[in-house]
Image: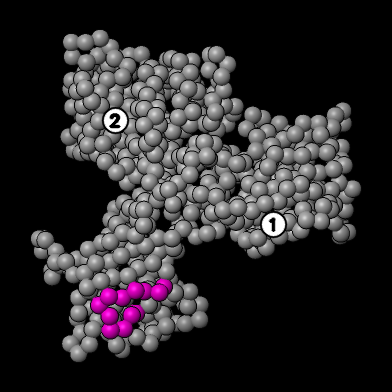
Amino acid sequence: MGNCFSDVAGGRAAVGGSAAAASAAAGNDAVDHFLKSRGLYGSQIELSFSATNMRDRDVLSKSDPMLVVYTKGRDGTLTEAFRTEVVLNSLNPTWIAKHTITFQFEVVQSLEFHAYDVDTQFHNMDVKSVEDARKLLINYSKDTMKHRMLKLEEQQFLGEASCVLSEVVTRPSRSLTLDLVYREDPMVSGNPRRCGQLIVHAEECISSKTTTEMILKCSNLEYKDLFSRSDPFLLISKIVEVGVPIPVCKTEVLKNDHHPVWKPVFLSIQQVGSKENPLMIECFNFSSSGKHDLIGKVQKSLADLEKLHSSGEGEHLFLPPTAGNNYQNKELKSQIFVEKFSQSSRHTFLDYLTGGCELNFMVAIDFTASNGNPRLPDSLHYVDPSGRLNAYQRAIIEVGEVLQFYDSDKRFPAWGFGARPIDGPVSHCFNLNGSNNHCEVDGVQGIMIAYTSALYNVSLAGPTLFGPVISNAALIASQSLANGGRKYFVLLIITDGVVTDLQETKDAIVKASDLPLSILIVGVGGADFKEMEILDADKGDRLESSTGRVASRDIVQFIPFRDVQSGEISVVQALLAELPTQFLSYMRSRNIQPNM
């Protein structure tokens, strides 16, 4: 197990199977990256569709409607994802076919829907979608596929609609009604004609909610260290048909223990596939080098582990045959036991959103002098007349356009820090809109306007202090909590330099860790942000205040903007990926239930 979980601080901690990570994205480290890179996180959403008062394009009967679902890229490109069946003679169809899609909180998932009246001669065609056609290319020639493929251009267009997936899943009813519109000539501008309504309904698959809690222990583990007992931990992996087992979670490391009992492990059915899916449970002796020694392993499904718990018996670990030997697995004296096994359905991130919880976006922007003169092209604050966005503008838009759908009034507190307003001293938390009374602006565009205006109304100064803006955000969160609000606040800090008041910032973060608040920090420019990673507890211990108090949870996520500009993962995805986990850890630790 070379170089996996190799950092000592993070490597000894549990990953992916803790209470906070249950039914949500895992905490950090190699397991988290491995799973996310394969799309194994995210709730599965089943979309169903119906329509009312559609256009009638048939002369002697009613239309025979079919719905086509497209995903829409950032550049507006449409990719066909799904087609329903054809409903005969109906202007108010309810389609039976459902479209399953993975909800990704950190991405704006734009959908577009096109409705068609399918001509009678095509009703008996088996192949309705592009994806089905691709699958059948194995058995059919291209000429045959052209004949069998339902061509949309040969059907009569009934209308179109569009939405963002988050608009559907955040509705209390999880249903969104859209106007179907039709343009006589797509090339001619003007108001389109309404031609019925489309109802999109979302249901979260139950497998996303079912969680298994287990307490695992081992006995008589073999010695792997010469002068001390082993430091064992368990790695649980999902066995797939092709390829290597996929890591699902890792327990904490227990030092010098040959009869270890680990903390409870939480596994969602979505993570493991099914209750019958085989799992590989491997017991390793921890090494700070990352090259952990295999003590033994066993292959069991959740169903098998439940039987072990019921019987009270243990299962012997085994070692696989070494390379070049043909003998069978070596059974060991070491055994694994299941001390506790229980299953429950836990509320998910989407349950809270549907139940009335909101995410409120806040932003704080660094106006220190190290950014450079905003009027010069080499400044990080330079506003390009051509419309090209600087790093600050990009971060605001990319984070804001995701979070805005979870905030009903879309009024966002916006601050600046490290600058001298006109005729005033240096301020480390001033209202970006220039008001002395209120800090809120209207929408993401309001933030952009206030930011540009502030560049011409303040003098860049310093130093870089985070404490005041974090304290201000915490005050808003605490006031909302005291008033019984069901809101969770997200503060985005964009900065070009290393924080100067590091201990004061730690104190503010530790204090805020008890509040419904997460802090996202984007580092822009070429500064060395090594020290900033201390604030993000992903790879080490939780923050500690100057009085010795430890943060109740990890609420900070930091990333340098330059690290993800040219990669496959956008800055938004990297920043927001942890947010559902932080949200759930807060709600569950305080036993806050969604309004269902």
Q: What's the magenta region? A: 86-97
Q: Residues within 10 Å of mark 2 (few under 14, many from 20)?
A: many
Residue 160 coordinates in the image, percent (x, y): 24, 66
* Lower sequence index among marks 2 and 1: 1
Hey, what amino acid is under mark 2? Answer: Pro
Q: Quadrant of the N terminus?
A: top right
Instruction: Give the side of residue 562 with respect to residue 152, left or right.
Output: right
At numbered mark 1, what does the secondary structure look like: helix, strand or loop? helix
- Whether residue 283 is in magenta: the answer is no
Name the foreground residue: 190 vs 403.
403
At numbered mark 2, what does the secondary structure look like: helix, strand or loop? strand
Instruction: Give the side of residue 78 with respect to residue 355, left or right.
Output: left
Image point (84%, 53%), residue name: 313
Image point (88%, 49%), residue name: 332
Instruction: Give the side of residue 325 with respect to residue 596, left or right.
Output: right
How many labels, in total?
2
Residue 336 coordinates in the image, percent (x, y): 80, 48
Residue position for label 2: 413
Residue 307 coordinates in the image, percent (x, y): 76, 58
Which mark is drawn over residue 302? Answer: 1
